[in-house]
Image (cartoon, rainbow, N blue to C red):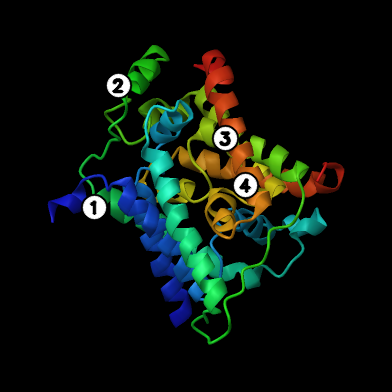
C-alpha cells in the first residue's frame, strides 16, 4: 500500500478527474468549481451591488458541499496520504526557479517563499497572491468557467467556447511566466 | 441530507486527486508553462480522453441520471471575446497564484494558509466582474 503515499501518476489521476465529472453528471449536477466564487459573493451580500449576484444561491448549495469536500480532501491527502510530497520537477525548472530565488523548488509541495509562514509578513508576497487570486476570479467569471468548467467539462462536450477559453488560459499563463515573472522575481 | 453527504464525498475524492496529482502545486503550473514536463499535459490530456468518451457515450445512449432523468449537458454560451479575454486574465492569475478555483480550496485544507489571500482575491475579482459586467466586451 506504499504507493498511496507516493505521488500519483498523471495517467491515473487524469481519468479520476473525468470520473469526478461523471459522478456529478450522474447526480444531475455539473463539474465547475469557479461558480462557487459567485455563490459565495452572493452569500456575502453582493446582490445589493449588482444584478449578477441576485439569484437563488440555495440552488447552488450542492456545489458548496463539493467545495467543503475538496477542503477536507486536501487535509486528508496532505496529512494522511503523503509523506512530504514534493513534485519531481525537471532539473531545468529547478535551476530556473533557484535563479529567481525560489530555493524550495524540488523540496516542497508549493514554494515556501510564497506559501510558507513568512508570507504574511511580506507585503510583496501578499500583493502577488492577492493579484493572482483577483485575476483568477475575474477571469473565470468573464470567461464563464475555469479549468474544471471549460478545460475539462466544456472540451469533453466538444464546446468551441471552452476551447477558446483554454487557449486564453495558456496565452495568459505564458505571458505571466515568460514576460512578467522576470520583473517580479 | 443523504445527497449532501454524497456530494461531500465526491468533493473529498476530488480534493485528494487534486493534491496527489500535484495539479494543486504552484511548481507544476510553472513547469507546464515552461513546457518542461509532460506531467500537466498528460493529466489534462488523459482526463479529456476519458471525459470525451464518457460525454459522447452519455449523449448517444441517452444515459439517465440517479433520478431517472436523461443527463442533460447545457451548451456553453456562445461568444469569442469573453472567452479569449476572460481566459487570458484567468491564465495570468493561474500562473501567478499557481492555483485555479478547485486547488485553492484543496491547499487551504492542506494547511497552506497564505492561499486564503488568493481565495479572498478570487472572491474580490468575481465581485468586480459582477460590477463591470455590462461595460466589458462579451
Residue at 59% from the left image edge and 52% from the top image edge = A150
Give the label on residue A81, or none. Answer: 1
The alpha-carbon separation of the residues under discs 2 and 1 comes to 26 Å
Chain letter for the residue marked with disc 3 in the picture: A
First-in-chain label (3 vs 2) = 2
The alpha-carbon separation of the residues under discs 4 and 3 comes to 11 Å
Chain letter for the residue marked with disc 1 in the picture: A
Q: From this view, report whether residue A25 is shown above or below residue B62.
A: above
Front residue of this view, candidates A161 and B19: A161
Residue at 41% from the left image edge and 66% from the top image edge = B10
Chain letter for the residue marked with disc 2 in the picture: A
Q: Which residue is mark 3?
A: A170
First-in-chain label (2 vs 1) = 1
Residue A102 percent location from the top left of the image: 38, 20
Q: From this view, report whether residue A97 is shown above or below residue B35.
A: above
Single out the residue that lies furthest toward the bottom.
B68
Amino acid at each position: 500500500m506504499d504507493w498511496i503515499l507516493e505521488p500519483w501518476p498523471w495517467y491515473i489521476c487524469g481519468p479520476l478527474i473525468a470520473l469526478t465529472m461523471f459522478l456529478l453528471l450522474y447526480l444531475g449536477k455539473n463539474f465547475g468549481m469557479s461558480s462557487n466564487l459567485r455563490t459565495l459573493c452572493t452569500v456575502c451580500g453582493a446582490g445589493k451591488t449588482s444584478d449578477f449576484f441576485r439569484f437563488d444561491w440555495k440552488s447552488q448549495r450542492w456545489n458548496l458541499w463539493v467545495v467543503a469536500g475538496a477542503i477536507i480532501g486536501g487535509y486528508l491527502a496532505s496529512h494522511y496520504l503523503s509523506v512530504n510530497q514534493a513534485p519531481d520537477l525537471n532539473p531545468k525548472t529547478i535551476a530556473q526557479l533557484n535563479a529567481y530565488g525560489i530555493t524550495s523548488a524540488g523540496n516542497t509541495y508549493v514554494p515556501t517563499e510564497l506559501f510558507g509562514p513568512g508570507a504574511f509578513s511580506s507585503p510583496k508576497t501578499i500583493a502577488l497572491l492577492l493579484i493572482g487570486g483577483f485575476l483568477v476570479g475575474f477571469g473565470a467569471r468573464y470567461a464563464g468557467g475555469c479549468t474544471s468548467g471549460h478545460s475539462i467539462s466544456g472540451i469533453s462536450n466538444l464546446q468551441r467556447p471552452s476551447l477558446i477559453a483554454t487557449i486564453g488560459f495558456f496565452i495568459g499563463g505564458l505571458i505571466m511566466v515568460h514576460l512578467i515573472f522576470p520583473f517580479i522575481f | 441530507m443523504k445527497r449532501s453527504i454524497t456530494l461531500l464525498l465526491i468533493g473529498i475524492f476530488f480534493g485528494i486527486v487534486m493534491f496527489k496529482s500535484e495539479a494543486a502545486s504552484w511548481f507544476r503550473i510553472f513547469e507546464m508553462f515552461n513546457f518542461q514536463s509532460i506531467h500537466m499535459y498528460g493529466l489534462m490530456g488523459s482526463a479529456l480522453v476519458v471525459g470525451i468518451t464518457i460525454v459522447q457515450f452519455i449523449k448517444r445512449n441517452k444515459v439517465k441520471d440517479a433520478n431517472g432523468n436523461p443527463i442533460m449537458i447545457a451548451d456553453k454560451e456562445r461568444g469569442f471575446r469573453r472567452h479569449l479575454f476572460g481566459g487570458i486574465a484567468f491564465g495570468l492569475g493561474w500562473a501567478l497564484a499557481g492555483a485555479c478555483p478547485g486547488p485553492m480550496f484543496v491547499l487551504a485544507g492542506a494547511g497552506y494558509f497564505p492561499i486564503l489571500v488568493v481565495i479572498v482575491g478570487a472572491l474580490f475579482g468575481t465581485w468586480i466582474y459582477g460590477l463591470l459586467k455590462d461595460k466589458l466586451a462579451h
